[in-house]
Image (spheres, helix red, strand yellow):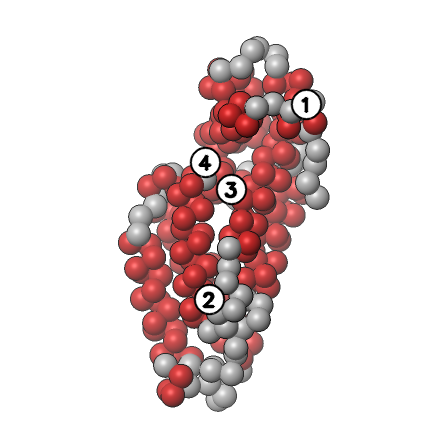
């Protein structure tokens, strides 16, 4: 559920972005408990104490950022062409869209990466909700309206889907470990992505569909 912060939303867009990016950067660098709101204020170049005019507490700001990241992730699904029903073509498309959004909002994805290692009890339950949104619902939303008849009949389809999902998650985790920031992500990721898809397609599609 998206929370409403009327004083913050009344600010000019440029000032909102400065505050958001400063907060994302500080939480990513130091984690929830050690993050300094004074550093955020300094980075955002806003008046001392003004941050708490927009958010009542550091926790409220953190929860807003979680909502903000969810909205960015939703942009991926807004751009998918659901008329493309081939399974592997769809995955390629999702990967390309996600790549472009990561390049556009690297600090948001750096924050999301840090969230995976956050153990502060104050925000743990909210983080779990984000995890379910990005992983569990993500597969359902990205894979709807697909033609699954191209898959081999001699394998259990659910097991095929499990193998593909595990591969995707493991690949994504491996790529996250390789980079310091999502600003550093390169097109090489998409090329490697394609190589794995070609292998899985040859393994799991009927020969006449390859």
Which mark sits nearer the N-terminus, 4 or 1?
A: 1
Q: CA distance from mark 4 to mark 1?
A: 23 Å
Comes first in the chain, label 3 or label 4: 4
- Relative height, residue 146 to residue 190 (above, below): below
Spatial CA span between label 2 and label 3: 24 Å
Separation of marks 3 and 1 at Cα, in angstroms: 25 Å
Instruction: Determine which residue is flagged by label 1.
Output: 7
Determine contact: label 4, label 1, CB under 8 Å.
no
According to the picture, the residue beneath numbered tag 3 turns out to be 112
The residue under the point 45% across, 64% down is: 91
Q: Is residue 210 left or right of residue 12?
A: left
Q: Nearer the viewer, mark 3 or mark 4?
A: 4
Q: Is residue 57 among the parts visible in the rendering?
A: no
**Number of marks in the rendered image:** 4
Image quarter where the N terminus lies is: top right
Q: Are marks 2 and 3 in contact (CB under 8 Å)?
A: no
Q: Secondary structure at mark 1?
A: helix
Disc nearer the start of the sequence (4/2): 2
Please tell me whether mark 3 sits on a helix, a strand or a loop. helix
Residue 54 x/y as whole percent: 65, 22
Q: Quadrant of the C terminus?
A: bottom left
Q: Which residue is mark 2?
A: 90
Tell me residue 118's x, y (percent). Answer: 55, 38
Q: Which residue is mark 4?
A: 107
Kindly indicate whether the residue at mark 2 contacts the one at mark 4 (C-beta within 8 angstroms): no
Residue 16: % across, % down: 55, 26
**Whole-Å distance between the Cαs marked 2 and 1?**
40 Å
Q: Residue at x 65, y 48 (%)?
A: 129
């Amino acid at each position: 559920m998206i929370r409403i912060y009327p004083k913050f939303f009344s600010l000019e867009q440029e000032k909102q972005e400065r505050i958001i990016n400063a907060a994302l950067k500080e939480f990513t660098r130091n984690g929830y408990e050690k993050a300094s709101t004074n550093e955020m204020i300094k980075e955002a170049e806003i008046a001392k104490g003004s941050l708490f005019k927009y958010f009542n507490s550091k926790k409220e700001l953190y929860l807003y950022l979680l909502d903000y990241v969810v909205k960015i992730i939703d942009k991926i699904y807004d751009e998918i062409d659901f008329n493309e029903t081939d399974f592997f073509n769809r995955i390629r498309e999702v990967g390309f869209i996600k790549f472009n959004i990561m390049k556009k909002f690297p600090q948001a994805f750096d924050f999301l990466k840090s969230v995976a290692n956050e153990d502060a009890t104050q925000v743990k339950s909210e983080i779990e909700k984000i995890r379910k949104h990005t992983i569990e619902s993500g597969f359902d939303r990205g894979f709807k309206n697909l033609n699954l008849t191209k898959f081999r009949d001699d394998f259990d389809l659910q097991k095929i889907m499990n193998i593909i999902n595990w591969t995707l998650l493991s690949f994504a985790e491996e790529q996250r470990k390789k980079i310091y920031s999502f600003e550093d992500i390169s097109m090489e990721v998409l090329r490697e992505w394609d190589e794995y898809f070609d292998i899985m397609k040859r393994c799991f599609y009927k020969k006449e569909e390859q």
